[in-house]
């Protein structure tokens, strides 16, 4: 089984309006940002199996969030992201 690596350009980008996500080794089917109460605050539900995706986070307030990315093989990856 080949491992995939989730790369998030989030620390600086979250200060702007877009979260850039890259998954090496597999395509992305879904990228979702949750607040700490488990509510969906941003979503990119059709990434089309590409290895990169962008999620619009302009409307969410500063804080700590969880990014969940699902690849084309059904594997999930989770990362903490901070919007400043």
Image (cartoon, rainbow, N blue to C red):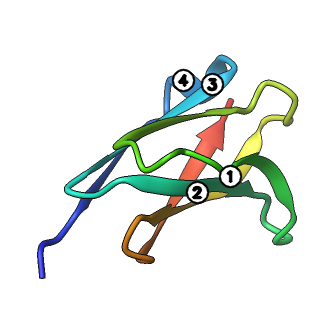
Please state which of the two labelled residues, at mark 3 or mark 4, is closer to the viewer. 3
Please state which of the two labelled residues, at mark 1 or mark 3, is closer to the viewer. 1
Check the image and report above or below for 63 versus 15: below
- Mark 4 to mark 1: distance in Å? 20 Å
Please state which of the two labelled residues, at mark 4 or mark 1, is closer to the viewer. 1
Q: Does residue 27 appear left or right of residue 82 in this picture?
A: left
Residue visible at 68% across and 52% down in the picture: 45
Q: Which residue is the site of mark 2?
A: 30
Secondary structure found at label 4: helix
- Quadrant location of the C terminus? top right
Q: Which residue is the site of mark 4?
A: 13
Q: Are marks 3 and 4 in contact (CB under 8 Å)?
A: yes
- Mark 3 to mark 4: distance in Å? 6 Å
Q: Is residue 10 visible?
A: no
Report how many numbered discs are placed on residues in the image.
4
Q: Does residue 8 appear left or right of residue 25 in this picture?
A: right
- Quadrant location of the N terminus? bottom left
Rendered location of residue 4, percent (x, y): 22, 63
Q: Earlier in the sequence, mark 3 or mark 4?
A: 4
Camera-nearest residue between 2 and 21: 2
- Mark 2 to mark 3: distance in Å? 15 Å
Residue visible at 67% across and 55% down in the picture: 32
Q: Earlier in the sequence, mark 2 or mark 4?
A: 4
Q: Which residue is the site of mark 3?
A: 18
Q: Which residue is the site of mark 1?
A: 45
Residue at the outermost top position: 16
Disc number for residue 59:
none
Q: Are marks 1 and 2 in contact (CB under 8 Å)?
A: yes
Classify mark 3: residues with Cα within 10 Å, few (<14), some (14-19) or many (20+): some
Q: Earlier in the sequence, mark 1 or mark 3?
A: 3
Q: Earlier in the sequence, mark 4 or mark 1?
A: 4
């Amino acid at each position: 089984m080949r491992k995939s690596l989730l790369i998030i350009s989030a620390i600086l980008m979250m200060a702007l309006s877009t979260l850039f996500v890259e998954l090496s080794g597999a395509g992305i089917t879904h990228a979702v940002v949750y607040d700490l109460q488990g509510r969906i605050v941003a979503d990119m539900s059709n990434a089309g199996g590409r290895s990169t995706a962008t999620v619009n986070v302009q409307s969410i307030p500063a804080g700590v969030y969880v990014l969940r990315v699902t690849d084309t093989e059904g594997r999930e990856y989770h990362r903490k992201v901070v919007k400043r």
